[in-house]
Image (cartoon, rainbow, N blue to C red):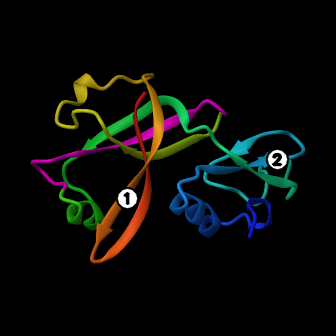
């Protein structure tokens, strides 16, 4: 199935991530872009959407260092002695998206700067024999 034939659903968005593609939806009427994907444009209230590939380049808008994480992150080895950072990124195309911030010193959040340039990366994790691809961001 081609990119343009896929439904505008979170499942399709996650399938693209598994293919290591950061995709969003763009309103053909007003031009606004959304990541994760939306079926309807909240501004125009239209379903006149198309898939667009995002560059994955942006700036760090917010982050937090987490020491008590979800079971998924605990299984990945994170915890009180090994924190991880969760971030919000403003993509160059406009939308804001969240993901794990990697390639920084999570134990020293004072060394991480809001506004620093970042790029998307795809994090493959094997847990219980199943590989999962998640979106992460690293300093550019």
The quarter of the rendered structure image containing the C terminus is top left
Q: Please, is residue 43 above or below residue 130 in the view?
A: above
Magenta residues span 78-93
- The quadrant of the rendering that contains the N terminus is bottom right
Quarter location, residue 63:
top left
Taking the magenta stretch, the answer to whether it contains residue 10 is no
Vertical relation: 132 (above or below) 58:
below
- Name which residue lies at 17% across and 36% down: 107
Assign a secondary structure to mark 2.
Answer: strand
Q: In this view, does 94 lie to the left or right of 102?
A: right
Nearest the viewer among 101 and 69 is 101
Task: Tell me the element at label 1.
Answer: strand
**Circle 1 sits on which residue?**
124
Q: Which residue is drawn at 66% across and 33% down?
A: 93
**What residue is at 43 percent from the left and 57 percent from the top?**
134
Residue 125's x, y, as percent? 33, 62
Figure quadrant of residue 57: top right
User: Tag 2: Cα neighbours inside 10 Å, few (<14), some, or many (≥20)?
Assistant: many
In the displayed structure, would residue 69 be above or below residue 136? below
Q: Seen in the image, is 37 located left or right of residue 29? A: left
Q: Residue furthest bottom?
A: 129
The spot of residue 11 in percent (x, y) is 60, 69
Left or right of 82? Residue 131 is: right
Give the Cα separation between the discs numbered 2 and 1.
Answer: 31 Å
**Residue 6: horizontal and vertical position, in percent?**
74, 67
> Mark 2 — residue?
27
């Amino acid at each position: 199935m081609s990119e343009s034939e896929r439904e505008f659903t979170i499942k399709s968005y996650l399938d693209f991530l598994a293919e290591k593609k950061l995709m969003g939806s763009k309103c053909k009427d007003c031009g606004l872009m959304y990541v994760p994907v939306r079926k309807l444009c909240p501004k125009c209230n239209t379903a006149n959407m198309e898939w667009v590939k995002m560059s994955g380049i942006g700036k760090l808008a917010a982050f937090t260092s987490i020491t008590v994480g979800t079971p998924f992150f605990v299984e990945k080895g994170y915890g009180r002695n090994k924190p991880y950072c969760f971030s919000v990124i403003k993509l160059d195309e406009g939308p804001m998206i969240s993901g794990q911030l990697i390639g920084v010193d999570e134990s020293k959040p004072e060394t991480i700067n809001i506004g620093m340039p970042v790029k998307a990366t795809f994090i493959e994790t094997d847990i219980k024999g199943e590989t999962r691809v998640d979106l992460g961001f690293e300093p550019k």
